[in-house]
Image (cartoon, rainbow, N blue to C red):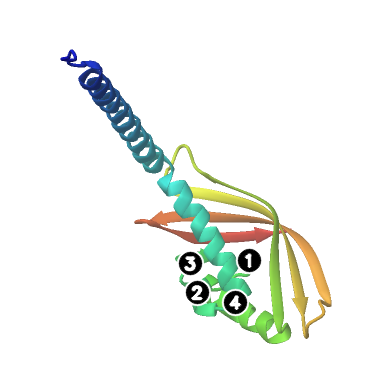
């Protein structure tokens, strides 16, 4: 007895192949859309991300007592609160504080950084920070400050132009 040929197998295979093509096309479309959104988002926030990275570098360099690291983030015309060369004032102030306190911790309680809408190479950061100093392991001095920082973009990097605190 001869059985009729079954056509179920080729149809199932064709249906599965069609589903695979649809899934692959959907996945590739989704992937391309994701890449396009990522590139668009990165290009728009790149200066903001670089600014926030500079703020974090400044905090880290201060906590590590890295005088050269801090000085590398200062603009050549950094303005000091005292009537003298800003970079030299910053260097002397750091050396004095670092020699006085064995451990320094900077806790950022709140912060906001924004790029100037009129001049995209200028930015301002405002932060509320707690400066905690210790001669040994136990903190013996803690104070809160409201800090305002002025920044200027130098190529891809942001440099600190002024620092004010209350």
Q: State the residue position of label 1.
A: 81
The reply to whether dot 4 and dot 1 touch (C-beta < 8 Å) is: no
Q: Residue at x 50, y 57 (%)?
A: 53
158, above or below 70, in the image: above
Q: Point out the tag, 4 or 1, that comes first from the N-terminus.
A: 4
Q: Could you classify mark 1 by the number of other residues whose Cα lies within 10 Å: few (under 14), some (14-19), or many (20 or more)?
A: some
Label 2 to label 4, Cα distance in Å? 9 Å
Disc 2, SS? helix
Q: State the residue position of label 3.
A: 73
Please state which of residues 48 and 13 is positioned toward the viewer in this rendering: 13
Q: Could you classify mark 4 by the number of other residues whose Cα lies within 10 Å: few (under 14), some (14-19), or many (20 or more)?
A: some
The reply to whether dot 2 and dot 4 touch (C-beta < 8 Å) is: yes
Name the quarter where the C terminus is drawn.
bottom right
Q: Position of residue 115 (x, y in %)?
A: 49, 44
Q: State the residue position of label 4.
A: 64
Disc 4, SS? loop
Label 3 to label 1, Cα distance in Å? 17 Å
114, above or below 60, in the image: above
């Amino acid at each position: 007895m001869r059985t009729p040929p079954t056509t179920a197998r080729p149809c199932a295979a064709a249906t599965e192949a069609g589903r695979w093509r649809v899934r692959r096309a959907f996945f590739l479309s989704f992937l391309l859309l994701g890449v396009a959104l990522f590139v668009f988002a990165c290009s728009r926030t790149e200066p903001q991300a670089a600014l926030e990275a500079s703020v974090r570098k400044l905090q880290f360099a201060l906590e590590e007592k890295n005088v050269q690291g801090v000085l590398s983030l200062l603009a050549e015309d950094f303005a000091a609160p005292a009537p003298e060369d800003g970079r030299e004032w910053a260097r002397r102030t750091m050396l004095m504080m670092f020699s006085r306190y064995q451990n320094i911790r900077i806790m950022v309680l709140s912060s906001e950084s924004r790029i100037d809408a009129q001049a995209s190479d200028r930015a301002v950061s405002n932060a509320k920070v707690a400066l905690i100093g210790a001669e040994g392991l136990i903190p013996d001095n803690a104070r809160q400050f409201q800090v305002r920082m002025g920044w200027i973009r130098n190529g891809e990097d942001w440099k600190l132009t002024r620092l004010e605190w209350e």
